[in-house]
Image: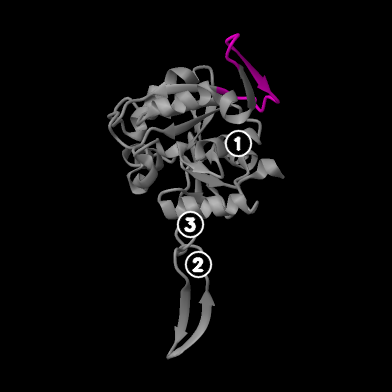
Amino acid sequence: MKAVILAGGLGTRISEESHLKPKPMIEVGGKPILWHIMKIYSSFGVNDFVICCGYKGYVIKEYFANYFLHNSDVTFDMQNNTMTVHDNHSEPWKVTLVDTGLETGTLGRLRFVERYLSGEKRFHFTYGDGVSDINLNKLLESHQASNRLITVTAVQPPGRFGALKIKGNDITEFQEKPTGDNNWISGGFFVIDNDVFKQLSDFQSSEMWEQAPMEFFTQNNQVNCFKHQGFWQPMDTLRDKNYLEDLFLKQEAPWATWEK
């Protein structure tokens, strides 16, 4: 199976760094968060990626074009104009980078890469800014058993603040950042049957995948839900980035399953 990753947005809520690079290239522990997401998929045997580029997409292309330079020791022999790569730390990845436009909606970006998914019965699909300790094998099993076109991973995001339970003037319980407010949200990490493209022709490419298309498929009983109750964290803000980096540098990153 292939994995399609959205990596073309502007990342305005983390503009402290995204004014220099696309959001998926913002580093966590010295590696782009896009790399972390790809490592999650690779740890489950998914090594063929289609990246939907847009804003500053050339930065992503440069990274993979010079992957050896970023991840290996290199000797440059200036006199003989040669380069020797030492201890090659490459990944078993095939990466297709597709320019899907600067202001294209997420639906349009998906439609842009349809031709790179020909021959695939289904594919993984996710965003280039969120990590999780999701079991992708169980996600795929849930999708196959559902006989639906789409499976979306549902998560309960962690609360930002601690919560108090109060009776009268007494605090009866203190919870440090409880899980959300019992609501489930989409955490990305979709599995989608290729037949979905047959039903997308009536939608405009400027539309967002998460809006009218997903509402349409939901109303037509074509969306399966996979509940993930483990770790999930998007990188929307600098605060989120610092939180993820702190976990990774402390070797406490739940999503880094390849380290285990």
What number is the disc on residue 157?
A: 3
Q: Is 80 left, or right, of 170 in this rendering?
A: right
* Residue pointed to by mark 2: 177
> What's the CA distance linking mark 1 and mark 3?
22 Å
Q: Kindly identify which residue carries mark 1.
A: 39
| Quadrant that contains the N terminus | top right
- Using the rendered image of the protein, determine whether residue 232 is visible from the camera's viewpoint: no
Question: In the image, is 238 to the left or to the right of 67?
Answer: left
Secondary structure category for the residue under label 2: loop
| Residue at 60% in and 8% down | 80
Horizontally, is 236 left or right of 80 in the view? left
The residue mark sitting in front, 3 or 2, is: 2
Q: Position of residue 218 (x, y in %)?
A: 40, 42
- For the record, the magenta segment spans 77-94
Q: Residue furthest top?
A: 80
Looking at the image, tell me whether mark 3 or mark 2 is earlier in sequence order. 3
Q: Position of residue 130 (x, y in %)?
A: 49, 45
Distance CA(mark 3)–CA(mark 2): 10 Å
What's the residue type where badge 1 is placed?
Lys
Check residue 87 for magenta coloring: yes
**Residue in the foreground of this view, choosing between 79 and 193:** 79
Q: Position of residue 2 (x, y in %)?
A: 55, 26
Q: Secondary structure at mark 3?
A: loop
Q: Picture quarter containing residue 20?
A: top left
